[in-house]
Image: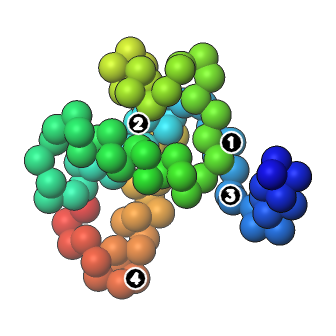
Amino acid sequence: MKLLKTVYDLLNPKPIWHGSPETFLAMILELQSMMPVTDTAEATLRLGKVMVTKYRISLTPYADLRELIEKGVPDRSKLHLMRKEISQLSVHFNLLPGY
């Protein structure tokens, strides 16, 4: 069974997250602040789980996503790049006026 999963992973690779878990936490919090959903821990956890299943993210030294959200300190040093890309997209597609 493990051999089949390995073959499947080789044929269908997921994108890999090359940042730290703290940068990932900052990105999740920033994305959630842009959504009209209330800021709850459950909504943050759901968004994080979606992102973890979409990308291969190593959360070490944290045990799981809940521990990262509870004990991690967001590293917001790379958020200016994400904001710049979103603002370029919003100007191009007129998706998020005023961001």
Q: Foreground mark, 2 or 4? A: 2
Image quadrant where residue 43 sits: top left
- The residue closer to the viewer here, 62 or 84, is 62
Q: Can the viewer see residue 73?
A: no
The amino acid marked with disc number 2 is Ala
Q: Is residue 97 left or right of residue 9?
A: left
Using the numbered discs, state the Cα–Cα distance from disc 1 to disc 2 in whole angstroms. Answer: 14 Å
In the picture, which quadrant includes the C terminus?
A: bottom left
Q: Which mark is residue 92?
A: 4
Q: Residue 44, position in %: x, y?
A: 29, 41
| Structural distance between the alpha carbons of marks 3 and 1 | 9 Å
- Element type at mark 4: helix
Mark toward the start of the polypeptide (1 vs 2)? 1
Cα distance in 3D space between marks 1 and 4? 27 Å
Q: Secondary structure at mark 1?
A: loop
The residue that label 2 is drawn on is 26
The residue pinned by badge 1 equals 18
The disc labelled 4 sits on which kind of residue? His
In the drawing, what numbered circle is on residue 15?
3
Asked if the residues shown at circle 2 and circle 4 are in contact, with their CB atoms under 8 angstroms apart, the answer is: no
CB of mark 1 within 8 Å of CB of mark 4? Answer: no
Determine whether, in the image, residue 22 is placed left or right of residue 6.
Answer: left
SS of the residue under disc 2: helix
User: Residue sitting at 27 percent across and 49 percent down?
Assistant: 32
x%, y% of residue 41? 22, 34
Task: Tell me which label, 2 or 4, sits earlier in the chain.
Answer: 2
Question: Residue 58: where, in percent of width, then height?
Answer: 64, 34
